Amino acid sequence: MNNWKKIKELLYFEDGSPRDICIKECNRELLHKWIGFVNNNFDLSFVYKEIISNKIDNKVVDTFLDEIDDTCYFITIHASHCKLYAYLFDDEEIEISFWPEDIQKVDDHKTILDCMLSFSNLLNKDVFLYKDNNHDNPLIVAENNTIRFIIHS
């Protein structure tokens, strides 16, 4: 899919909701693997309680996941010109959101696809792109080093 106008229309249409990149059926080991990859390959900010760090701290994440308090833990990942927002709810799913209006050109689209493929290859998991909170109908699936576009009518 190389026609930017069509890509924007089908995937990054602006409807006021973010898009979600999801990796399902994870566990603590896979989460730590993802954290290591993100720490080593992206500029980021990890916000927990009142502290902002440029690296995700596995110990802080483990404590949060073990004790689950009301504190919001989130990560802003700077992937080229795209900002991705990961929210840590549990270790069973990694969910990363972004705003479709931030995807302005083919290079931004390629950055999203590259991230999805990298995460898929790293964790040996399918990675899905959904419209926000519509996890029944993926728009894209990254699997086995390939990208599959799913067109919904």
Image (spheres, rainbow, N blue to C red):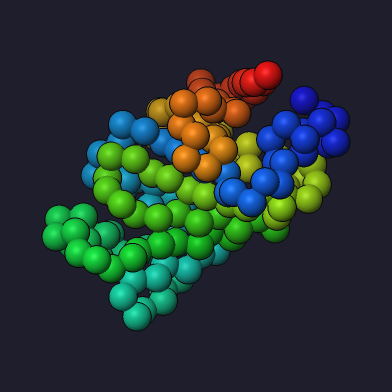
> In the image shown, does 145 or 64 lie closer to the viewer?
64
Residue located at (28% from left, 68% from top): 71
Q: How many numbered marks appear? A: 0
Q: Which quadrant would residue 150 be assigned to in this image?
A: top right
Residue located at (34% from left, 71% from top): 48
Q: Tell me where residue 98 appears, x and y as whole percent.
A: 58, 51
**Above or below: residue 127 compared with residue 111:** above
Q: Is 59 on the left or on the right of 123, as rendered?
A: left
Residue located at (77% from left, 25% from top): 1
Residue found at the far bottom of this picture: 50
Q: Tell me where residue 146 appears, x and y as whole percent.
A: 59, 22
> In the image shown, does 115 or 40 lie closer to the viewer?
115
Residue located at (14% from left, 60% from top): 67
Q: Can residue 119 be seen here?
A: no
> In the image shown, does 121 or 52 lie closer to the viewer?
52
> In the image shown, does 146 or 18 lie closer to the viewer?
18
Q: Can residue 117 be seen here?
A: yes
- Quadrant location of the C terminus? top right
Q: Tell me where residue 68 appears, x and y as whole percent.
A: 19, 59
Q: Is 130 on the left or on the right of 29, as rendered?
A: right
Q: Is 30 on the left or on the right of 81, as rendered?
A: left
**Above or below: residue 51 compared with residue 64:** below
Q: Tell me where residue 120 appears, x and y as whole percent.
A: 47, 32
**Above or below: residue 96 compared with residue 92:** below
